[in-house]
Image: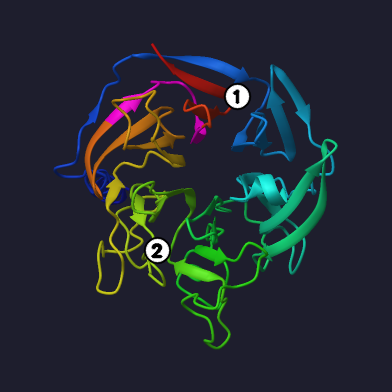
Amino acid sequence: MIKYASLLLFFLLISCMAQEKKDDIQLQDEVIRYTFETVASGIPIPWGMVWLPDGTMLVTEKSGVLYQIGNGVKSEIKNVPKVYNRGQGGLLDIALHPNYAQNGWIYITYASSEGEGEGGNTKLIRAKLENGGLTQIESLYKASPNTTKGQHFGSRIVFDKEGFLFFSTGERGNHFVNPQDITRDNGKIYRLNEDGSTPKDNPFVGQKDTKEAIYTYGNRNPQGLAIHPVTGDLWEHEHGPKGGDEINIIKKGANYGWPVVTYGIDYNGTTISTETEKPGIEKPIYYWLPSIAPSGMAFVTSDRYPEWKGHLLVGSLKFQYLELVKLKDNTIIGRQKIGTDIGRIRNVAQGPDGYIYIGVEGKGILKITPN
């Protein structure tokens, strides 16, 4: 019994040591120069948010409700597809087509039980909004097979400057199979044309039995995607296990390593991989140790926040603050805490009015106003 206890203590010490990052960029305490204003309450788990040309917001709530918010009024959009609401799955992200004013297309990801197997998996659709309801709903992509596991659905949506649509899926808890296998869905970032078809120059087009929509693989659970406003590069962050959340710049056909390489360990303290880097695998430009559980991601371009402009905002579910990740080109040079203990931040976005908005679990949508 004493031998067993000593062995357990040894593994716990090793586990704690593995969660220390040498020479890390210190997280600075917040300097309060702003206030938080509640824009919409009564949204238990706000997930995605986007603005229509009339200034109203569309906000997804994980259980399956799509809200339209504006002028102090919050209404439910009708005819939203039924979601598979389990664990981390439900109604997820939302984005507008770059030419929304002309074509009216809205893109949505959610956990769906349609297709092969029991449970659910991430699905991408597009639809139009007419008379308070979704119409002309088109299915664009459905990850398969379904599984009853409740973790790691992804999922974010973003359009790049060329009009291609990117969306992410997590590896659905099957991390030793899905992420590294390009014949299988999950643990991937996909690239599609606006109508859901596969671009002819996708990296794996023409390879036997591959999922040709795949753009990158080896991604554990990406819940942040954003286009760099200057370079046009796609930036991503993803959840690590216990330690090792990452920020990556997404490159065509690249392998981001999960679970072959990782900076983290399993939740029970056991080793997933002894490798933190390997030839042929992209290294993150930054990783968090311990994990902050990142969700939501936005570059600040607004003049309303002079000290934040040109930098990156990332929400933390675990530590319940917004993190300002300071950049010099593609290098992380500083980290600043914003909104200490504000709550589990699910999303962050810059609105067309130049203000920063965050979706906070149990609180709704908050607007950050500089003092």
Q: Is mark 2 on a helix, strand or loop?
A: loop
Q: Counting other residues with Cα less than 10 Å from the Cα at mark 2, is it few (<14), some (14-19), or many (20 or more)?
A: many
Q: In this view, does 368 lie above or below 162?
A: above
Residue ranking furthest to the front: 102
Q: Mark 1 or mark 2: name the one nearer the start of the chain.
A: 2
Position of 297 with respect to 145 (left or right) is: left
Q: Distance between the residues labelled 1 and 2?
A: 32 Å
* Residue 366 in picture, x, y percent from top left: 54, 22
Q: Indicate the amino acid at tag 1.
A: Gly
Residue ranking furthest to the left: 23
Q: Is residue 87 visible?
A: no
Image quadrant in which you'd find residue 256 = bottom left
Q: Is mark 1 on a helix, strand or loop?
A: loop
Identify the main secondary structure in magenta: strand
Image quadrant in which you'd find residue 119 = bottom right
Question: Contact (CB < 8 A) between labels 1 and 2?
Answer: no
Image quadrant in which you'd find residue 321 = top left
Q: Can residue 75 be seen in this view?
A: yes
**Which range is magenta?**
336-350
* Residue 32 in picture, x, y percent from top left: 33, 14
Q: Indicate the amino acid at tag 2.
A: Trp
Position of 246 with respect to 222 (left or right) is: left
Judging by the rendered image, the residue that carries numbered circle 2 is 258
* Residue 324 in picture, x, y percent from top left: 33, 32
Q: Which mark is drawn over residue 325? A: none
* Residue 150 in picture, x, y percent from top left: 62, 51
Residue in the image at 34% along x and 47% along y: 243
Q: In this view, does 244 lie above or below 143?
A: above
Instruction: Judge by depth and name the residue closer to the eye, 127 or 204.
Output: 127
Judging by the rendered image, the residue that carries numbered circle 1 is 362
Position of 289 with respect to 193 (left or right) is: left
